[in-house]
Image (spheres, grey):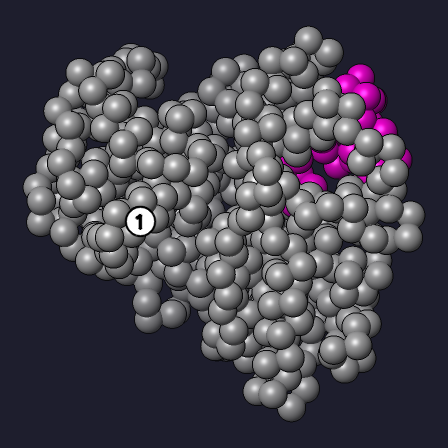
Amino acid sequence: MYALAAVDIGAESGRVILGQVSADSIELREIHRFLNVPVRIAETLYWDFPYLYSQVISGIGKVLTQCERLESVGIDTWGVDFGLIDKRGRLLQNPVHYRDRRTKGIMEKAFKAVPKQEIYEKTGIQFMEINTIYQLYSLIVDNDPLLDIADKILMIPDLFNHFLTGGTLSEFTNASTTQMYDCRSRAWVKDLVGKLGIRSDLFPEVVDAGTEVGYIEVEELPKGIKLVAPATHDTGSAVAGTPFINADNSVFISCGTWALVGMETKQPIVNQVSMEWNLSNEGGVHGTTRFLKNVMGLWLLQECRRQWAKEGVELGYDVLVDNASKVGQAVALIDPDNPEFLYPGDLPARIKQFCAETEQPIPDGPAQIARTIMESLALKFDFVIGLLKKASSREVERIHIVGGGSRNTLLCQLTADATGLEVVAGPAEATALGNIGMQGVALGIFNSIHDVRLLIGKLPEIRTYSPINDMSDKKARFSELLGVSGVL
């Protein structure tokens, strides 16, 4: 057995997981967990990178007490966010959170310098104002002096790798989320970003998932531990850890804070349909593409829970899902991707306001609001799957839901009902499994991620949901709500 460690950091929390691996088995054990709480200073929302870095060091140290020899470590995080380092390799400021309002309205300004179609044609990436390109452009617009002294831009997992090894590399799957990377030629689009005033020398060399990026060289840890870049974008690792029965006729939903609804394809899909409906071509492992769309995801429940806790009502996810299951059908529906739902704050009040503005009944209390969120998410998943099928000309027979959302039994059943398709739920730890699986490929333990997926498919937690209830009426109402009746 080989001991490998996966560091998986999401928007709510991070974990360090020990994987005991052989050619025919993978066993995971969570060793260390920590919160990921952003910090607002003045008007800016930051990630607390020094704290996160200290927790990564602490977690790796704890792993070392649980195994005789640690072969490698791999780090994955969310995408789009970054840190700037100077010529001495020092972090110039804490990375700014993608939910910070500095990019509000910035896309329209960017499109005056570079046409929207040109950006999409080269990058194939969904337009979202949180994308790295618009975060950087906001610094240009604000004449921020940070860019004058910055030497390199490093995505969040690359930033951890830099401070652990001293290297300055970027990994493909995360670089592809920036909307500054050519999805076909696989190179930074330096000419394009130059039109926005962004320096081309900021961008580091890009390596593939499964690359050994160096050895950990920090005082707190022993020398000689390999650092491997898995798919450093957490969705990239989650898709790598998805037990596809047949990827060619399946859709994945990596469901956590965000829900990434997509297909694994051999080539990017950039056409009129994909641009019109804002679909994304992100990098995958072994040269694949994750053809997908971002949907707001369980952030809606997370932020509602935070608001209710402020009001003195503490509700665990299991309790909330159980109560939503008992409350009956949702009295109203929302568009999960309404821009007003993106930012932190009183989300239950915003949901009620949305329902009032769209002349629907107002959901009353946590159970009804949770039911509204989950039915709306399932219907949005169905709509996005229809777009993916239309743009790719592929048929879909099965949906794989992985990540924390795979434990949400109500959401899984609603997704089966809304789509009329079989839903295979699990594993919840797909990201960690994909992370460790790609480390195993790099070390020669596995031949490819296909071998890893075969092992994952045998895990006892995998559950299957078949359609039970007809949601045709709700699908029609939802289409009217989105203003897309008759599109599919």
Q: Taking 208 as reference, is 260 above or below it?
A: above
- Which secondary structure, mark 1? helix
Amino acid carrying label 1: it is Lys
- Could you tell me which quadrant the N terminus lies in? bottom right
Q: Residue at x 33, y 71 (%)?
A: 460
Residue on which the image places disc 1: 310
Q: Is residue 186 magenta?
A: yes
The one of 428 and 271 positioned closer to us in this rendering = 428
Q: What is the quadrant of residue 330 in the picture?
A: top left
Where does the magenta region start and end?
174-203
Residue 266 drawn at (x, y percent) = 60, 40
Locate residue 57: give its quadrant.
bottom right
| Residue at 15% over, 28% down | 362
Residue lying furthest top = 112
Q: Position of residue 204 (x, y in %)?
A: 83, 44
Residue at the extreme front of the image, as rendered: 42
Number of dots carrying numbers: 1
Closer to us: 402 or 302: 302
The percent coordinates of residue 50 (x first, y second) are 67, 59
Where residue 26 appears, as percent x and y from the top left, is 50, 75
